[in-house]
Image (tube, grey):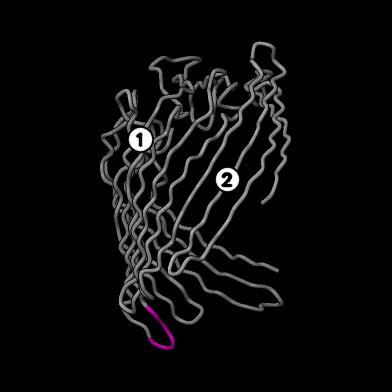
Amino acid sequence: MGVQVISSRFFAEKEGDAEILVPGTRTNSYSAFLTESMDVGPTVAQFGLRVEHTTIDSSLRANPDRSFTPISVSVSDLWKVDDKSSINLALTRSQRAPQVQELYFEGVHEPTRSFERGNGDLDTETSYNVDLGYKFNTSWVTAELNLFHNWVNDYIYLQRTGATVSGSPEQVFQQKSATFMGYEMQFIFPVWKNPSQAVDFTFFSDVTQAKLHNGGHVPNTPPLRWGFQVDHAYGNWSSNLRLTRAEKQSNSGFEEADTPGYYLLNLNTHYHIENFQKADMLLYAKGNNLLNENIRNSASFLRNFSPEPGIGAEIGIRIKY
């Protein structure tokens, strides 16, 4: 059980210009929360409750002051089937208040290269979620599978309008009900292990389907992804090679371009030195996008303007005292 009090002030203006993007706004948030856990035989049950009251006061008279009272509750149960496997089920009902930028922002947003407009009429976003997970751990494989299905009322998101303002595409914060569903999975196989070194092979995959209830798809949704990773550990050396395949994303949002599929190959290695002059040292090298693929990230606002970085490398030293 606990309480949390947050008071903050936010103001944003265009760099090198007097244009106000977000007027001075005071946000006060007061919340109380409760968590409880109980062991019942082979199961562990958990309960959580959070009640919050948030007030948002804008210094600009044209912007209405707002207040919200989000209430979130969760119930979960972890069932240990045996020493090797377990099943987890979680049911949650969560709410969140709109953020200041979602309510009052107006102007060119450089990170997204768009003209964004807030929406002072936004209401509390409410999500009903079901998560089901399964874990299996033996000497020959460690497996994890998670399924989720979320129903979101008054989902807040940025919607392209198709218009252009100040030379930039216009995006407006809107609310519509939406449904999200998908999975995440991972299988780790210990290929080789002895006292000095180990090799693991991992297969992974994830996908999210996100649809608006009135038709169309939620913007900036990632596509189906799958791939493998090979890990090698030898003394203080650790290395991994990771190949990710992202399929074509054809379920794009309104006024969004589809993105083609791609392969992303990364190589990482590092050497760990303990107690180096009373410090912890890590020498590392990274090779990124080794296939030099033209990657358009469907979850990025900038995919129409520029691809992700091409082939590159990084070498460095990290020291902690």
**In the rendering, at what x and y percent does residue 274 appear?**
62, 78
Please identify the quarter of the rendering in which residue 5 is found.
Answer: top right
162 vs 251: above or below: above
Identified at 64% across, 72% down, the residue is 280
**In the rendering, at what x and y percent does residue 271 appear?**
52, 73
**In the rendering, at what x and y percent does residue 297 appear?**
37, 40
Looking at the rendering, the stretch of residues picked out in magenta corresponds to 194-198
For the C terminus, the image quarter is bottom right
Identified at 36% across, 69% down, the residue is 81
Give amino acid for label 2: Leu
The residue nearer to you, when weighing 34 against 53, is: 34
Q: Residues within 10 Å of mark 2 (few under 14, many from 20)?
A: some
Give amino acid for label 1: Thr
**In the rendering, at what x and y percent does residue 129 appear?**
42, 43
Identified at 59% across, 30% down, the residue is 99
State left or right for residue 218 relative to residue 175.
left
Q: Which residue is mark 1?
A: 179
Q: Residues within 10 Å of mark 1 (few under 14, many from 20)?
A: many
Q: Which residue is mark 2?
A: 49
State left or right for residue 283 relative to residue 168.
right
Q: Residue furthest bottom?
A: 195
Task: Check whether the beta carbons of the residues at disc 1 and disc 2 lie within 8 A of each other.
Answer: no
Mark closer to the observer (1, 2): 2
Q: How many marks?
A: 2
State left or right for residue 152 relative to residue 54.
left
